[in-house]
Image: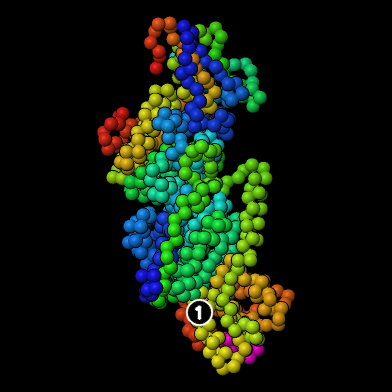
Amino acid sequence: MSRIAINEERCKGCLLCTAACPEGILRRSGHINSQGYKVAEADPALAGACTGCTACARVCPDLVIMVWRTVKAGAKEAR
Amino acid sequence: MADERIFVKGNEAVAMGAMDAGLKAYFGYPITPQNEIPEFMSANLPAAGGAFVQAESEIAAVNMVLGAAATGVRAMTSSSSPGISLMQESISYMAGSETPCVIVNMMRGGPGLGDINTAQGDYHQSVRGGGHGDYRTPCLAPASCQEAYDLTREAFDWAFTHRTPVLIVGDAILGQMKEPLLRAAPRPADPDEGSDWRLEGAKGRERRIVRSLFLADGALAKVNARLRDKYRALEPLARAETVFTEDADLVVVAFGSIGRIVKSAVRKLRAEGHKVGLVRPITLYPFPSALLRGLAASGKRFLTVEHNLGQMVDDVRLAVCGLAESDFFGELAGNIPTPDLFEDAIRRALAGGSQ
Amino acid sequence: MSENLVFSRTPSLFDVATHYCPGCQHGVAQRLVGEYIDQENLAEQTLMVTSIGCSVLIYNYLAYDAVEAPHGRAPAVATGVKRANPDKLVFTYQGDGDLASIGMAEIMHAANRGERITVVFVNNTVYGMTGGQMAPTTLPGQKTTTSPRGRDTATSGSPMHMAEIMAALPGVAYSARAALNNVKHIVQAKKAIRRAFDVQRQNLGMGFVELLSNCPTNWKMTPLQSNEHIENALIPCFPLGVYKDVDNQGAN
């Protein structure tokens, strides 16, 4: 499965990523980082649907998100 | 060519001095009485491999200088009083960011639109940091076409040695008069000049910023302290021409074209037997305070003569404070002074009368 | 199965938190610039001219030799930089107050001269850094701290359309307007930024790209609402598209 990682300490809780994700995986989490922002997270129940499209990372103003795209064995490399 | 004297205007001498100093970029805007400078540059600088732009305003011109100078290039602009007023913000930026350049002011009558004839009304603006904030710029005041050439050349060395904007303070008489000039050999290019601070693309090193904004706690204070120390270190470099001062009872202080005219008056009065001398500051900043103080300590009296309502006289009074005073005679901007005018003022001072 | 890292921070961007407000698209705009320069391997050739506004500290985020210009004067400063160093990649990064208000003369004349520079113009219809005053690009009726009853075009004029104005000048080789409020627009913006830099390198003239951006704080909206506002209010007033491309390779 493709996946993302969110650098919680840099997240400002703007939630722009939540609107960008075509699979609706991202949401506001319940926890607050040391800067006082309520950070975004991938809903664990939905994270498996991630396609590695990078939409979330590209709308994030703070470069908080890294994205890995899974490549099936034998398939041509993505991008 | 080396020993050939040419007959040029003061404006042309300034332009030639800059080119022979290795000027690589000139940005300017037309304003009377200095237009020969951008005109000369437009004709000669591109052929010498430099950049010339007639900017859309003096504000744009001085900011083009800021950009070129930030990359370590010898860059210059020129203007006259109202245009120099427009340039003040950028000069403040360059002082704060320690960016070297040369700015030429051929003073004219003010305030406001004033006139297009000679005056000395920009002294305070020149020597006290005419823009906002605490800064100074070295100011050099030529009184002849040869001196205009020599001091403009020297100005670039001041600028790069001390990392500061440097002002050439001239006036309409200097800009427009024609005198013989002997050019010196052009300065060989120095590709390493400024290599420790200039912007050139961050290759193999951390990136550099030419800036004057310092928001971090204590950071701006450090910059101001460095500037203060820099200006203190300039004091020994103050320079003046002295004429007949050793045994003078009365010392006349005057700069620029007025200093030149006053020199004639002083010579004439000396020939009549009067013990009068002249101090003509060549560096308006740093001001030759130590020289004046020494003369004051030996009991001389002072008369400051300017083409304004009294500006340099403040610095003379500060220099001699406690030891002597300075009387003042000023021609009003808008009038053209004659040697007789100054001669009469000096006679009054010699006779112990007031102005 | 294996996985490839397909998105991470481009090397030109320092790994630091920014001072921008949550959701501010300066973060996106500066990233797009950094991505182009890194993709073209030009970081060591780049000279950046910064301006006055929320982006005044952009030199803390993009790792290029940079010079700080007085308010509005970046195109003049960039002119001096580029004329003295024609082989370097020179760009300005300016907001709507800096470029379209105090800096109007400088951008017009740098464009008219066809300076070989790239101008990244971030338009969010308001003065952000100073607390939300009216800008030349403020929309009619838009409430700001200096137009508390809404911008009255009878006394304050209408929004200035810089991409169109730039396109009319022969010295401008490329002028486009893009937006940053969704991924599709960000993709177009990235193409526009690429072209705006390419025309400099191809010595064709000035490259100008206007990026419609947000200001959640001074618009008094959430970041998500601000993106809606760009879609519903800004774009109808400032249409997206390529207004000029001397090679007609624009994405319009």
Q: Residue furthest bottom?
A: B272
Left or right: where does residue C16 sit relative to residue B61?
A: right
Query: Where in the figure is residue B59, as x and y percent of width and height?
Result: 45, 55
Residue at the location (51% across, 85% down)?
B264
**Count of labels in the image:** 1
Question: Depth check: C215 or C66 in front?
Answer: C66
Quarter occupied by the N terminus of chain B: bottom left
Question: Depth check: C55 or B251 in front?
Answer: B251
Chain letter belonging to callout 1: B
Query: Where in the figure is residue B78, as x and y percent of width and height?
Result: 44, 62
Left or right: where does residue A77 sit relative to residue B167?
A: left
Question: Depth check: B173 or C103 in front?
Answer: B173
Q: Amino acid at mark 1?
A: Arg
Residue at the location (62% across, 16% down)?
A30
Main SS of the magenta part reads helix
Q: Which residues are magenta?
A: B345-354
Query: Where in the figure is residue C66, as x and y percent of width and height?
Result: 50, 42
- On screen, C231 above or below B230? above
Left or right: where does residue C136 sit relative to residue B159?
A: left
